[in-house]
Structures are given as C-alpha cells and as structure tokens.
Amino acid sequence: MAYSHGDGHHPPQSFWTRYVWSQDHKVIAVQYTITAILIGLVGLVLSNLMRLQLGFPGRFAFIDAQHYYQFVTMHGMIMVIYLLTALFLGGFGNYLIPLMVGARDMVFPFLNMLSYWVYLVAVLVLVASFFVPGGPTGAGWTLYPPQAILPGTPGDGAGIILMLVSLLIFIVAATMGGLNYVTTVLQARTEGMTMFRLPLSVWGIFMATILALLAFPALFVSAVMMLLDKTLGTSFFMPAVISLGQTLGYKGGSPLLFQHLFWFFGHPEVYIVALPAFGIVSDLISTHARKNIFGYRMMVWAIIAIGVLSVVVWAHHMFVSGMNPYFGFFFATTTLIIAIPTALKVYNWVLTLWRGNIHLTVPMLFAIAFVSMFTIGGLTGLFLGNVSVDIPLSNTYFVVAHFHMVMGVAPILVVFGGLYHWFPKVTGRMLNDTLGKLHFWITFVGTYLIYFPMHYLGFLGMPRRYYAYDNYQFIPPSAQQLNVFITVVALIVGVAQLLFLFNLAWSAFKGRLAGPNPWGATTLEWQTPDTPPTHGNWGEAQPVVYRWAYEYSVPGATEDFVPQNLMPEGEGEGE
Amino acid sequence: MALAIALVIIVVAAVLFHVLSPWWMTPLASNWGQIDTTLSITIVITGLVFVVINLFIAYAVVRYRRRVGRRADYQPENKKLEGWLMGLTTVGIVAMLAPGLLVYAKLINPPEDALVLEVVGQQWQWSFRFAGRDGQLGSSGIDFINADNPLGLNPTDTRGQDDVLVQGNEVHLPLGRPVKVLLRSKDVLHDFYVQPFRARMNLVPGMVTHFWFTPTKTGRYEILCAQLCGVGHYNMRGMVVVEDEAAFQKWLNSQPTFRETMTKTAATGGEALVKQGATLAQSQGCFACHSVDGSTRVGPSWKGLYGKTETFADGTTAQVDDAYLHQFIRNPTARVPKGYPPIMPKFDLSDQQLAALVAYIESLGQGKGKDAVAQQ
C-alpha cells in the first residue's frame, strides 16, 4: 500500500536508502535501538567483570585495580548515556512519536537521520578509547576533576580525551534528535489530537526531550572546559595541585564548579531516563489491564511538575562535596518535594490495576515489576535526598543499590516491557512468550536479589568504587560472602539476557504473525493500515482523532477498547 | 498468580532480611545519634509504603486477573482520592524532612570551643595537624610543599611554628570534646569517612572544607577515603584513636612541632638509615601502593624486591640493586615494570633521604624480609 503524492514523501527506492541512509523515523528507531543494545551489551559485560572482582577478589589476574576502575567508569557511562538515553529518546521516541501523534514522519527527517549517524560516531569514539594507549578513562562516570585528567587515574591521556569528545558528539546527536521530537509533538499532531489526548508515552518522551535540551548544554560546556584544562593547560576546574609529587601549572580553578555543572545536567538526566519510562509504563499498564489510566490529567501534570522540579534538585548529589552548607536546606527540601508528584504516579499506576481485567502478558509482567522496583528505588531516594540521612550513606553501596534500582533496573524493565509490547508492530511478529517469561523471571527476581541486600552493605559503610576491601576491620567476613552471592546472581542475570537477544533475533523472522493490533490497544500506532507500517505510516489519509488514548472497557461499547481514531456514531463525541 | 506470590515473598523476605541482617550501621561513636534517629524514622515510613504498595499490587493482580466476560471499571479520575493520597504523602515527607533539617542545622554549626584538627589528603594517604600552644594553625599553601615540609606550611608564619604535625596515618582524639575538622587536599578530591562518627566531608583541592563531631566512645576507628581518588583509592587508609584526655595529651606531646621537623638532623649509620627510610616511606605515602608483606597493591611489593630480577613492559630485564633503585626512584616512568601502571610519581628527595629509602627497601629484600617487617 505504497502511497505517494507530491509533497516530498517519496518512498525510498534502493536497499541503501531504505535501511541504511534512511530518513524514515521507524528505520532510524530500529537503528538507534540495535546500536544502543549492542553497546549496552558491552556495558553489561563490564558490570559482570566488576562483579567477578568484587565476588572473587584477585582471582582473575587481568582485573587489576586499573582495569577495575576502567570497567566501573565505562559501565556507568555506557548504561546511562549510550544505552538508556539513546534507547528511550532515539529508539522509543523515534518510533512512537510520529505514529502516536498521527504524523507521517518526524518534522525534519534529514536531521533525524543525521542524529543517528552522529550518535553512531559518538559510540565508535567511545569504543575506540578501549584501544588507545592507557585504555579508557577510569575516573568514574562522573569524571570529577582534578582526578579525571591527572596521572594516578587510569586513562588520563587519550582515554579521557576520547571520552569527552565522545560526549560532545553524543550531545550534538541528542540535540538534533531532541529538536525533532519536540517540534513534531508540538506541530505535527494530526487532526483532533490535542495535547490532552496524547498517550502518556508521548508526554514522557516529550518532557524528557525538553529536559535533555536544557540539561545537555551544561554537560557540553563542562566537557569543553575540561578538554581545554587537559590539552591547553587552562584552569577552569583545576586549582593549584601537586599531583603525585609534581607541581603542575594549574591555578585558581574550581573542582566544585564542575560538580555543579555536571549535576545540573546529571540530575535532569535521571529524569530524561525516567520520564519516558513513566510514560511507557502507564500505557502498558492501561492496555494490559484493559482499563483507562487512572487520573490521566494528574499524570500529565505530574510529568510536567517532575520535569520542572528536576532542574532545581541537582546539588543533592553534593551534600558532602564541600559546597556552601546552607545549600543543603534548599536542595533537601526540593528533593523531597519532588517525591510527591512521583508518589502520585505510583499510586495511579496501582489504582489503574484496581478493578481492571489484568492480562498478565509479558509486557505487563515487566510493567508491574517496574512499579515494584521503582517504588523501592524511589523510597531509598528519600534517604539520600534528606541531607542529614545522606551524610553517612553518601558514596556507599547504599547509593549504588539506590540508583541501580531506580534509574538502572527500573527503566530497563520498561525497555524490555516496551520492546515485548511494540515488537509486533515493528516486525509484524510476536516475540516468543515462553522465552519472554523465562527472561522476565530471571531478570526480575535476580535484580531484586542483587540490589536489595546491597543497601545493607551501604548501611554498614562499605564505600563504593573500591577495588578490594582487604584488612578493613569494621567489615565482617560475612560481607564478602554476600558479595559472592551477589556476583553469582549478577552472572546469571547477565547470561539470561542472551535469552532476550535470541528471542529478538529468532522472532523477527520466525515469530508468530501478530496482526495489526494484537493487544487490542486504542492508540494510533496500532491502527496503521499496514503492519509493520510502511513509509508515510498512514496510507492515503492521516487518521483523525476523536477521543483520548485510554478508552478501555467503556460501558456500552461492544469491544473493551475504542481506538482513538474510530469515528463516533454521533458527532462531537469525545472525552 | 505467580507474580502475586513473588511480590508477597519479596515483601516478607525484605522485612525478614531487614530484621535478621548481620550487616548494619557500625555502633555509633559520636554525638550524631539524631542522624540515626532520622534514619530510623525514614526506614519506618518508607518501609511501610514499600509493604503496602507491593501487597496492594499482589492483591490487585489476583483479585482482578483476566476473566472471560469480565469488564474493567471505567473511571478516568477520582479527584478526592488523589487529593487524599497527595495529602498523606506530604505528611510523610514532612515527617522525614523536618527532623532531617533540624539535625542538619546543628551539623553545619560547629561549637566555638571545638578542638581544631586539620586533615590533609593526598594520593593515597592522610596527614594530620593540630594547632600548637598558641591555639592557632599557621597558614599553608601548595607552593610551600617540599620533602621537608610535606604539609606545605608557611615557614615564615609564626603561628605555624608550634603546630603539631602528626607522624604517620594514625591520629588521636580526646573523648567527649567537640572536634572541628578542617580538610584540604594537595591533589584530587578525597573524602574523610569514619562510619561510626556518621558526619564526614570531602577534601577539595584549592579550598578548605570542614565538619564537626564529638567522639563519645573510646576505641580505634578506621578512616576510609570515600571519594574516588585514582587507582589507589581503595587503599587510602588511616586510623582515629579516641582516648581519654590525659592519654591524648601524652600522645600529642610526643608528636613533633613544625619547627622541630624543619630542624631535625638527618640520622646516619646503617640501622638508623633503615629506620629513617621506613619513616620516610610512611610520610611520603609509599605504602599506598607498595606493601611490605608481599601482597600486590598498585605497585610491586617491597618484600623480596631487592635482589630480584625485574621484567619490564618492553620485555627487557634488570637486577634490582642500589643503582637500579636510585635510578628508578629519580625517574620512575622511564622504565615500567611489566604488569603495573606507569603512574609512580617523582618524589622530591634529597640524596641522603633517597639513600635511606633504598636502604629500607634493601632491608626488605630477598632473605631479609622478616626483621624489617617487624619494624613496621
């Protein structure tokens, strides 16, 4: 059902223009997703290598202190930026926004294509840093100066330079994509698609993109300044120091300035990852519980409130940094206030389940697991956001457990849920259910076993980013046994992800045919004339939207869902 | 169904784990019991929410699971319910935030009469300084740092002459007296973390940070660095000894003043030389990377090093002897021993100090290890 009328939307002709230099948002989404998953696999392997050292210190000779810190750093950076950010915005954002708002494509398709290729360059530069002399940087993903650019830190030469360059390139890519997503949501919605009829997935991605456009520039300037400090000897972040016995020429710079800039980016970054997850999980829960999302308007306002508040909480990462101590009052208060709209979202998810007709499909399992995982991760955030409680816990394994649950595992569960949910639309085939359930159970139970006990190592006071804990008297030997346990589970969960990859690859070709709307969902992407949707998405005419996105189980309707674009029998009917 | 069971098991296991866990905060040894109290309040409130949410989901998943012929309710919103939930959440938040901020107000206001302890960090060791009889710390600066003046005190500042410089990485504190800790760093960020004291702070090069606490229990407490500071981060060790006032004063009097360390005459003679080398190795932070018991840290262990044949990254070898060690320590990155990162700093040592250091390493060499280890 190729359509073509003379408005510039020509279907691509050759293999190259169709799948490689494609300007089709759906192909770009798949390119983003595959690239992010591949680099994410590197991040996963790195985490397992770290766990090997922590579980069995010294057993693996190639994991020396230098390599350990490199693994720590690259794992964090890859997972946060190159996997989660890229996958939610570049992957889900690209695929879902035009389809869900009823557009034929992004507003700027060429820019969209460029965004992917620039992202790929950023990934390649990042990977290249593994192969330069000295290896990748081992400064921790926060890249705090002065340490990040001084000897004594692994990869203080080419490693840190490539890391910063890669981030700069990534931000260019994210900006090109981001401008597109925002403009498309604001300008390219089809007839009848008001902002308050948008599915929450679009709202979450939209708000996250606005945050990205505001927050990434802070990282951009810090990366530029650190590059200058490193290569030209400027002193933006560098005070006078004696590094390993050598007096260096730096003078007058401020390490705290970097931390403020980094977290001005870094905290919104948490929500850049979380808000798309919030949005997507809302749609998954509503669809598979066959019930409208509870409190849609409040959910939208909560997304907006969280987005706005997220730019005034950054210094809660710096309670013991040495900044002016009076900041502590302000940032502790804003941080705990942000818990209120966030809690509201959790309540509304579980209230959506209430009196639903819950289909425990694989996407739904992941969605519910997300709510549980996010709840505990959010709650432990209340420890760390409350300045005086944070002080003994800062930089311990409590922090590691907290942020992995809240912004590592929880969003990844949504990524899985989302992929199981939309895979049938992308490929026209279902993912295998049995493999999916196996993957779900190992991942869900495994991550709980890994991270729940880890909080207690933090209470005990075990600092994070330690290569080894030999001869510390206050750490009982049982802590090491717990570390062995965590490592074993982490290895199992790591290997179990192969099930998922196999499922993706196998089902793409051999999976059961899905049909256009296997879940009985209301949103527009399930109403395309073709599955998978062809170039231009809608055939001859774009859809017209008559109602909000959550018309499930409406009393009196014949089916338990009413698509957004189904023409009502009477006129002017809607919300 | 399986999901509901899993969620219930998670809740039960989490609560049991919390009660039975052998891993918990070290016993409090400072005045900051209020931090622990706030933490306990937070655990109760958040724990309750955790249990309720998960059990609610488990119940909903069973009660409203898919049934043929069932229709879900259609209820877009319920303003009253949402209002109540937000109100309750706000109450919970206030119950945690208020006590938290009250403690914090105290945390950032050290008492006027507090004993001042200066902590200086560098990769990967701690140093300490107390004010002398005049009760004032002398000024300091990066530019003043050299082998004889490792803390970089201003030699012309009269207030600093009687400052007490603690030898080694162990500092003593008197029981029951408030201590205001001033922190500075020579190189990168560090964090002075003694878990039983609860309070702590980063060391930031280019500025002086501070925090305070009152030790309330005698004992020995480990100092950890809890801000990533490079490849030796995990080995940046120190010790705080809390003891009664008399013992503290006795210990304090045994430590040299700044003036004394500057005028100290160099020891000579074989055994004295080894002893001086050991002290030097301690003060220069060599042990952050080199063990004397044969275990591998960032750099090779000194046990058995002298006399062995070292292999380098480029495949060449050399016998470790006096000449080699002199050459290596003067220019540590010229040749890199295989398997170690090329990060050894150049130390600004006099010829006499270098000779002492090499004598000490020799004393740990092959067949000589035991005596020297005993000295440590």
Image: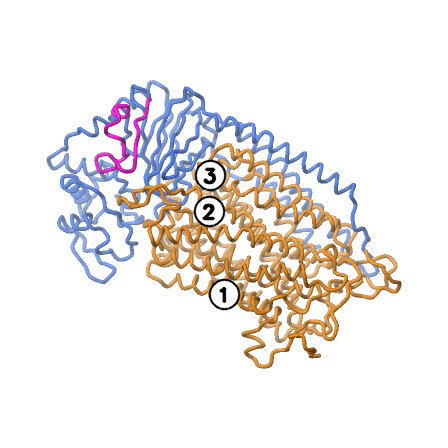
Placement of A316 over or under A573, stated as above or below:
above
Residue extent of the magenta highlight: B136-162
Give the labeled residue for mark 1.
Answer: A118
Q: Quadrant of the C terminus of chain B?
A: top left
Our reading of the magenta stretch's main secondary structure is: loop
User: What's the chain of the residue with tag 1?
Assistant: A
Amino acid tagged 1? Val
- Specify the colour of chain B: blue
For marks 2 and 3, give the one nearer the viewer. Answer: 3
Left or right, B321 with respect to A439, comes to left
In the rendered image, residues at marks 2 and 3 fall on the same chain: yes
Q: Residue at x 65, y 45 (%)?
A: A305
Q: Residue at x 25, y 60 (%)?
A: B313
Give the labeled residue for mark 2.
Answer: A481
Amino acid tagged 2? Gln
| Residue B155 belongs to magenta span | yes
In the rendered image, residues at marks 1 and 2 fall on the same chain: yes
Query: Which chain, by letter, is orange?
Result: A
Q: Is residue B124 visible to us here?
A: no
Q: Residue at x 68, y 77 (%)?
A: A6
Q: Nearer the viewer, residue B250 or A571?
A: A571
The alpha-carbon separation of the residues under discs 3 and 1 comes to 42 Å
Placement of A557 over or under B329, stated as above or below:
below
Q: Nearer the viewer, residue A115 or B203?
A: A115
Give the labeled residue for mark 3.
Answer: A461
The alpha-carbon separation of the residues under discs 1 and 2 comes to 45 Å
- Residue A306 position in % (x across, y down): 63, 46
Q: Earlier in the sequence, mark 2 or mark 3?
A: 3
- Helix, strand or loop status at disc 2: helix
- Residue A18 position in % (x across, y down): 58, 77
